[in-house]
Amino acid sequence: MVITSTEPGRFTFRGDSMVELLGPGGSLEMVEAVFRAGADSVYTGVLGWSRRSKKYEMNDEELRKAVKIAHEYGGMLRAAINAMPKSGEGEMYVDKLDTLYSMDIDAVILNDIGLMKITRERYPDLKIVASIGASILNKEEAMLYRTAGADMFVADCKMSLDEMVEIKKYTGLGVEVLVHANTDFTYLGRCWMSSYKSLKYETIDAKAYYIGSPNRGGVCFRPCLLNWKLCGERVYTSDFKLPNDMFLMLDEVPEMIDRGVDCLKIQGREYSVSLIHDLVRLYRNFVDEYMERGGVDLEAYRTELDAIAEKRDSERLRRTLELMRAARVERSEV
């Protein structure tokens, strides 16, 4: 994807340029594998500051190595700082931001408007992506984040392509779409259910870290996937799970490219390196073939994607069971 500067710290995203393929980096091994598979960029979680277990985040030394890997491949590295900060952590964020900038991080992923404003004022040339956790749903809300400093936003999974295009046209923000993620019974990045199930307070280098609350930097224990029942004067229904299903887009991708979506994002920091490598490679081949030929054999790609999805579902089930067991004893390392 070609990014052109229109003024200091602002960027436009050309709809006729190559779409950016963004993959997850839950470890240095995964960062390497994702770039080897053909990703244009990788996102990694900053230890204590992103919406994942600290097992899948990176400390400063690891982040420096990740940036080096990215730039050796001619790619970009984004640092996810998408957990809601505790009051009084502003100066702590500035220190972390200075460290990240000194590493030549290419972008930061934020959902807090205040942190966006700090970032834009301090480093006007650093690209800012408004996280899925910002829950941007309309063009006026998107403009608010644009004014705060965002260059790109991650579209909510419930948003239509028409709505994405309208927001891009109105605000000038780049559009990032999740092609591998999960649907949710609420908005992604806004669920607090896990914190009601199990919550424990710790610190990481003085940074507040709330185990059981991904919104505050901890891990989600996925209580929505437990068996639930609806009770009142009687049990109205039982043994059901709340909606939380994984998806893999394919058929929608060509139209997204044609209509100017700027970035296709693959989630999956907690999956195996081999699975994510294969997933990135499939989307790399799909996008390249479509861009070069103007069409693809969808059936062939569907067959390959189905095989990857079967492995993904197996890994996700094992991870869900691990998280549920951990919730019972409030383990933090999961």
Image (cartoon, rainbow, N blue to C red):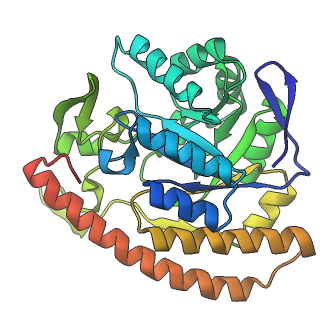
Would you say 329 lies left or right of 323 here?
A: left
Image vertical order of residue 125 relative to residue 152, above or below: above
Q: Quadrant of residue 315?
A: bottom left
In this rendering, the count of numbered labels is 0
Q: Position of residue 137 (x, y in %)?
A: 62, 37
Q: Position of residue 244 (x, y in %)?
A: 40, 60
Q: Residue furthest left?
A: 329
Q: Position of residue 114 (x, y in %)?
A: 52, 16
Image vertical order of residue 143 relative to residue 56, above or below: above
Q: Is residue 257 visible?
A: yes
Q: Position of residue 242 (x, y in %)?
A: 33, 59
Residue at point 28%, 55% (across, down): 222
Nearest the eye: 144 or 34? 34
Would you say 92 lies left or right of 125 here?
A: left
Nearest the eye: 196 or 6? 6
Name the quarter where the C terminus is drawn: bottom left
Residue at point 70%, 26% (across, down): 140
Residue at point 77%, 68% (across, down): 287
Nearest the eye: 101 or 182? 101
Q: Is residue 189 visible?
A: no
